[in-house]
Amino acid sequence: MLNISLIQVQYLIALDEHRNFIKAADACFVTQPTLSMQMKKLEDELGVIIFDRSKQPITPTPIGVKIIRQAKTIYRETRQIENILHEFKGDISGSLKIGILPTIANALIPKLIHEVSMNHPDLKLTIKEGLTHEIIDALENDQLDIGIVSTPVQNNGLIVRELYLEKFRIYAHKNHPSFHKKAWEATDLLEDKLWLLSEGNCFRVQTINLCSLPEEKLNHLALTYESGSLQTLKKIVDFEGGATIIPEWEASELDDVSLDHLRAFKTDDAGRAVGIIYTKFYAKEQIINSVEEMIKRCLPNHVAENKDLKIIST
């Protein structure tokens, strides 16, 4: 019978994540000699070398890869016991690690933090912004509990809960050739500079798909800057002209001056879906239910009323 402790399992997972003994020890709040000693004891117990220490960063050996995969399963299943107890007691407490798209975070997160502090002060939130593929990777590696992303997602191993639908809005400079129009055709965007989010952002892909913008037209526009921030793009429009696309919820929270720069699409029937994603191993069902309810309470009425939009793919 093998004698392996949960502490060793936790250290093993941290070392795999950081690939460095000092960083892994810091993440586990122990000294580096303590973590190194426990890893040596684990390897002695198993009779195999889990990490090749001759490389920098250290890398798992072939057998180490299999052991680490099983260790993550053990750790995940052990955490379920704690989750089951919280569910039984009706507690909304503990920690919740959330990954969220930057294009969603600006409008939602300040309100969600307020909801949690008012209704569930014992629930500790850790929130990290990232791209969809980064959030999915973190979920699958137990680095996040839930993700808040644009859906659908192409991953059958995830559970998806739809939260809301929102339309797209155009933010345009007053000197844009189409500024006088209150409702735009997609082709109006090609009349001047179009500022887009950088590669990898699903909102960029949705913008291109929504407007059916051909690649040769995008190249012709000679986009000189691609940003990861919608707020940065708005400021660029203010200073450099042109236009950009922003989500409906964020658009509604602009100041009065900026609201004058907003335009809708003539066929205002398309948008994006936003949802919660998590793995089937995540057992904090009561916490997810509560987060879902709080997010829906945060929604402005005009977004909550969106029911039948054509969802633009990512």
Image (tube, rainbow, N blue to C red):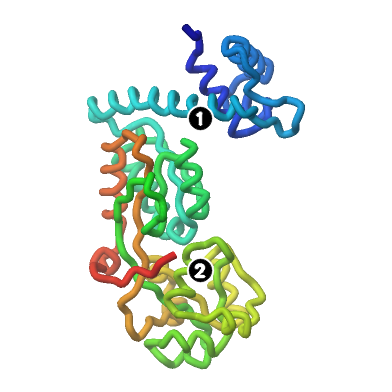
Q: Position of residue 42 (x, y in %)?
A: 58, 14
Q: Position of residue 46 (x, y in %)?
A: 57, 13
Residue in the picture at 58% in, 10% down: 45
Left or right? Give the position of 227 relative to 119: right
Q: Residues within 10 Å of mark 2 (few under 14, many from 20)?
A: many
Left or right? Give the position of 282 relative to 102: left
Relative to 275, residue 270 above or below: below
Residue that carries the numbered disc 2 in the rendered image: 204
Residue in the picture at 26% in, 43% down: 289
Left or right? Give the position of 271 relative to 26: left
Q: Residues within 10 Å of mark 1 (few under 14, many from 20)?
A: few
**In front: 46, or 262?**
46
Query: How many numbered marks appear?
Result: 2
Residue that carries the numbered disc 1 in the rendered image: 69
Residue in the picture at 38% in, 81% down: 264
Q: Which label belongs to residue 142? A: none
Q: Quadrant of residue 252?
A: bottom left
